[in-house]
């Protein structure tokens, strides 16, 4: 497996176990981005010279690369700044069509990312009625709950592919199947699963898919919205911005060719290598679960339904802040979504699962990727067991992605 170039991290540094927040940029993707930053720097909208033509070719090649992951077509890919923008465009962009056709009902779940929940809240203030279904205790949304929430005037169903806090895979294929004879549009926030969990996103019943580049080892600031045609018709989205006409008029502005090329390359690599990457990540997960057994963790999500890259757990009697600080020299971990880390309130995801307050306050998210190295688990365990004891001098040096670590 490729690793990051030497010198990108300056030891001593903890092993990075927060890949659900953002991942490292694959060196092959870096090279693609740099090419279109420094050599082929043309504007894809400049059609009268070679620089512009080559930039346009890079953009269209990236569309093909992104589309291939979900079995879409090049013309169904709209480039955005990331999954947050894609979610907003998918949800808010359907509002005008819903108002015009009298379909004012929206269905989603209580465990969605804030970039879905907040647009839904905005729509509720514009006359739409929103039904948010609760998850099962294991962190997944039962298809039956979605079916029971449907109405004749339901405009949209929005359910994420993989929960960003717990790593629990949602039953997208089953939800798509029950919508076969219903006109509602189906939107999937695939920020955590695109390029990793391949099969479910290839279902043609999914109309809209949001993706984010920095979760598949491309740079931050780039993503896409898949707008899959149904019966030859694209979802009737209205743009959120105006001016320029780029991306079929849905997302105006000069195209960031280097970032788009990077997303395309990252998508191509993810499709080609996803099985090997998942095997590496499953092995990492097996070791993690075995090593941490002595701490008696409680898992916040059905382990049989989680992706190979994410585990959410609580350690009895220990708050997440205490644990994160204690292991900070060994591993960089988080207590949930980086997008809401400035909030003092407990996770809305774990709250929706009806976990008790102590368990939510102790929740830790460990997330990794195929480029991650195992940390010194003995040092990790000792740090946790030492919480509340007098601090001792540091006795070991931890490592980052791409550096050797203890298995």
Image: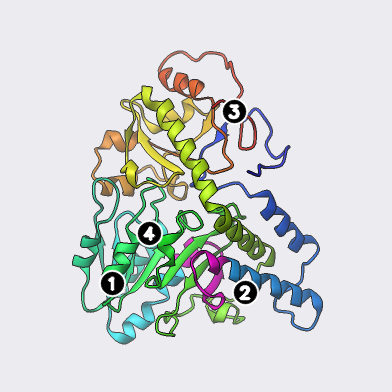
Q: Out of 263 and 125, give the one closest to the viewer.
A: 263
| Residue plotted at (33% across, 80% down) | 98
Task: Please say if the residues under marks 3 and 2 sit with CB atoms less than 8 Å apart.
Answer: no
Label 1, label 4: how many angstroms apart (C-alpha)?
16 Å
Query: Vertically, is 251 above or below 337?
Result: below
Which one is closest to the eye, mark 2 or mark 1? 1
Write the start and end of the magenta stretch as one range. 66-87
Side of 107 where 20 appears, left or right? right
Figure quadrant of residue 356: top left
Classify the position of the N terminus by image quarter: top right
Which numbered disc covers residue 405? 3
Asked if the stretch drawn in magenta spans residue 84, the answer is: yes
In the image, residue 223 lies at what x, y percent? Answer: 55, 63
In the image, residue 64 lies at what x, y percent? Answer: 59, 71
Label 3, label 2: how many angstroms apart (C-alpha)?
44 Å
Element marked by disc 4: loop
Name the residue beneath numbered marker 4: 160
Name the residue beneath numbered marker 2: 253
Which one is closest to the eye, mark 2 or mark 4? 4
């Amino acid at each position: 497996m490729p690793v990051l170039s030497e010198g990108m991290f300056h030891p001593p540094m903890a092993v990075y176990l927060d890949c659900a927040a953002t991942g490292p940029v694959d060196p092959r993707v870096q090279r693609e981005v740099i090419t279109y930053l420094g050599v082929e720097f043309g504007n894809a909208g400049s059609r009268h010279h070679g620089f512009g033509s080559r930039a346009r070719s890079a953009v269209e090649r990236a569309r093909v690369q992104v589309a291939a992951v979900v079995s879409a077509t090049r013309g169904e890919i709209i480039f955005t700044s990331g999954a947050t923008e894609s979610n907003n465009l998918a949800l808010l962009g359907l509002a005008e069509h819903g108002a015009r056709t009298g379909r004012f009902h929206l269905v989603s779940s209580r465990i969605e990312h804030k970039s879905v929940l907040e647009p839904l809240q905005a729509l509720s203030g514009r006359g739409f009625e929103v039904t948010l279904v609760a998850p099962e205790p294991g962190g997944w949304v039962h298809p039956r709950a979605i079916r029971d929430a449907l109405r004749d005037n339901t405009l949209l169903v929005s359910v994420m592919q993989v929960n960003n806090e717990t790593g629990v895979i949602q039953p997208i294929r089953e939800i798509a199947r029950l919508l076969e004879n219903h006109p509602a549009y189906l939107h999937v926030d695939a920020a955590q699963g695109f390029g990793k969990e391949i099969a479910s996103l290839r279902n043609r019943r999914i109309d809209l898919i949001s993706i984010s580049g920095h979760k598949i080892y491309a740079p931050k600031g780039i993503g896409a919205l898949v707008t899959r045609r149904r019966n030859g018709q694209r979802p009737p989205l209205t743009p959120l911005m105006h001016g320029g006409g780029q991306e079929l008029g849905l997302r105006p502005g000069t195209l960031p060719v280097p970032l788009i090329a990077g997303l395309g390359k990252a998508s191509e690599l993810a499709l080609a290598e996803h099985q090997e990457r998942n095997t590496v990540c499953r092995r990492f997960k097996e070791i993690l679960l075995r090593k941490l057994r002595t701490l008696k963790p409680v898992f916040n999500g059905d382990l049989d339904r989680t992706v190979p890259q994410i585990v959410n757990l609580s350690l009895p009697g220990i708050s997440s802040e205490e644990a994160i600080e204690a292991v900070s020299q060994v591993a960089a971990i988080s207590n949930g979504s980086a997008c809401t880390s400035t909030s003092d309130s407990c996770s809305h995801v774990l709250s929706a699962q009806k976990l008790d307050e102590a368990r939510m306050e102790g929740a830790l998210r460990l997330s990794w990727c195929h480029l991650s190295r195992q940390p010194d688990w003995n040092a990790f365990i000792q740090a946790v067991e030492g919480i509340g004891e007098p601090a001792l001098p540091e006795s070991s040096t931890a490592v980052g992605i791409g550096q050797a670590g203890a298995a």
